[in-house]
Image (cartoon, rainbow, N blue to C red):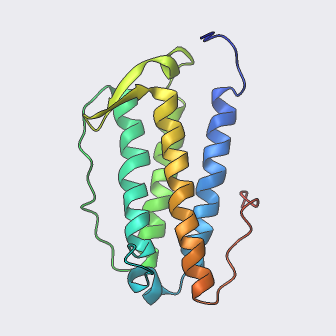
Amino acid sequence: MNATATVLNSQQLLIHWQGHRNLTRRVIEAFPEKDLFEFSIGGMRPFSKLTLELLAIAGPALEAIVDGINNVFDESFQPTTKAEILAKWDGHTEVINEYFSQISEERFQESFKLFGQYEFPVYQNILYFVDNEIHHRGQGYVYLRALGIEPPFFWERER
């Protein structure tokens, strides 16, 4: 593997990731308050629970990567309103911006054991954060459509 070949630089990767985060935020906003916390299909978790998983991963995991700490997966945040989720989401956006900029290009190739159990190169962990968010956002799209709500266009990632 040639580690010097570049498809994206770190700033482009961050912009891509934050574009997905912008879109997911708009999906959260689209939910009626009650349905955000209660609506589900086929035994899947309500979208509020899916967003809590995303919040438990991205910011804390990126902070752990930068600080070189072994943190635990923590979904203890238990909001009761959409506003609380959005405030936490926005706070994590800033955490991501702050910590992402501290990762050197060389560090993206280093192995890191995420939450003490998932060991992959840093860039693969970050791609997992994005992939997992896309996966759960897709569930949110299904919920919104089932509720008769048109979700945001998936290609509109900027605010």
Which residue is more in the foreground, 13 or 41?
41
Left of 40 or right of it: where is 140?
Answer: right
In this rendering, the answer to whether 49 lies above or below 37 is above
Q: How many marks?
A: 0
The structure residue drawn at horizontal position 23% and vertical position 43%, both measured from the top left corner, is 72
Residue drawn 39% across and 81% down? 37
Q: Residue 15 sits in which quadrant?
A: top right
For the C terminus, the image quarter is bottom right
Q: Quadrant of residue 50?
A: bottom left
In the rendered image, which quarter contains the N terminus? top right
In the rendered image, is residue 102 in sight? no
Picture residue at 69% right of the left edge, 81% below the top: 150
Asked if residue 147 is positioned above or below residue 11 in the image, the reply reads below
Q: Could you tell me if residue 157 is visible in this image?
A: yes
In the picture provided, is 19 more to the left or to the right than 55? right
Looking at the image, which is closer to me, 128 or 152? Answer: 128
- Residue 140 position within the rendered picture, expressed as x and y whole percent measured from the top left: 54, 72
Height in image: 39 above or below 47? below
